[in-house]
Image: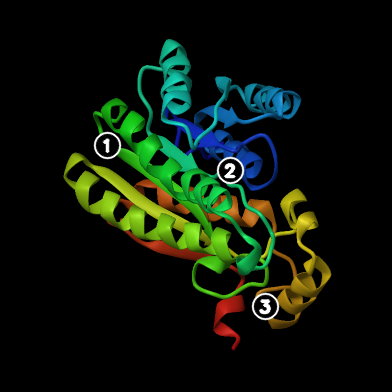
Amino acid sequence: MNEPLAGKIAFVTGASRGIGRAIALKLAQAGCDVALAYHNSHEEAAAVCESIRALGRRALAVQADVSDPSSVAEAFGAFRQQFERVDIVVSNAAIGVLRPALELSLKHWRRCLETNALALNLLAQQAAPLMPRGGRIVGISSLGASRAIPHYAFIGASKAALEALARSLAQELGPRGIRVNVVNAGVVDTDALKYFPNREELLAEYARRTPAGPRLTPEDVAGGVYLLCLPEAEMITGQTLVVDGGFCISG
C-alpha cells in the first residue's frame, strides 16, 4: 500500500462530517494517525474515528470550540495525552449566518471572524511547539474570499482574513520548517450548502461553468490538502490552492 504520509500525526478540526471528514479519512489512508476536533457531533466524530482505526491508524476525537482560546488549549491538552507531536494541522471548522450584509450584527461578525479566521492562529499557537521537525498547517477557505456571493458577506470576509493570516503565519513559521497554506474550495454540495437560499442556483451555475466536471466533492478538496502535505510540497508556503474544477477561470 502506498502511504506517503506514513507515521505522520494530523489534527483536523470540523472533522465529523463533510469536507473535514473527507480530509481526516484521506490523511489516514495516506498513513496518518488522526485527531479530530468536533463541536457538537459526537456520534459522527466517533464514527469517523472507527473508520480511521479500521485502516490501522490511531484516532482521537476531542470536543472543541475553535474560536475560544481556552477550548483550543484544552483540546490540545487532550491531544498530548495520546500523541507526542503533531505534523499536520487542518483548520476546517467554520460557521456563518446567511443573510444580506445590512441585516448582520456585530455578534455575527465576531462569530464568523473568530471561528473562520482567528481559529487558524489559535491552532498554530498550540501546534507550533509540537512541531520540532517542522510540519504543515492548512486552512480551508472558499470562493467567497474573493467573490461576492449573495448572503455570504461576513463569511466571505472571514475567509479572506484567513487567507491573509496564513500568509503572515507562513512567513513567521517558515524558519522553523512549518509550511502554512490554504485550500480554497469551490461549491461543494455538503450539509452546509442546504442552508443557502440559492442552493439550486449555485449548483446549476457551478455545473454550467466548471470545465473539469459538474460536481466537486469533499474528497476533491481533501485531495488538495493531501497534496500540500506531501514531502514534494516542502517549498510551497503562504499560498492559496484553488480547488474548484476550473470554475474561477470561466468568466
- The residue to which callout 3 is attached is 210
Query: Which quarter of the figure has residue 129?
Result: top left
Q: Disc 2 residue type? A: Ile
Q: Where is residue 175 in the image (x, y as percent from the top left)?
A: 16, 45
User: Residue drawn 59% across and 88% down?
Assistant: 251
Q: Disc 3 residue type? A: Thr
Give the numbered dot on residue 167.
none
- The residue to which callout 2 is attached is 23
Secondary element type, mark 2? helix
The 10 Å Cα crowd at callout 3, few under 14, some 14 to 19, many 20 or more, is: some
Q: Along the line of sight, which residue is nearer the eye, 117 or 237?
A: 117
Q: Along the line of sight, which residue is nearer the eye, 116 or 233?
A: 116
Q: Where is residue 232 in the image (x, y as percent from the top left)?
A: 35, 52
Q: Position of residue 72 (x, y in %)?
A: 45, 28
- The residue to which callout 1 is attached is 134
User: Residue drawn 66% across and 80% down?
Assistant: 211
Circles 1, 2 touching at the beta carbon (< 8 Å): no
Mark closer to the chain start, 2 or 3: 2
Circles 3, 1 touching at the beta carbon (< 8 Å): no
Task: Tell me the distance, in whole angstroms, between the alpha carbons under discs 2 and 3.
Answer: 22 Å
The quarter in which the N terminus is drawn is top right
Secondary element type, mark 3? loop
Mark closer to the chain start, 1 or 2: 2
- Which residue is the extreme one toward the top? 81
User: Would residue 198 appear left or right of 223 to someone viewing this image?
Assistant: right
Q: Disc 1 residue type? A: Gly
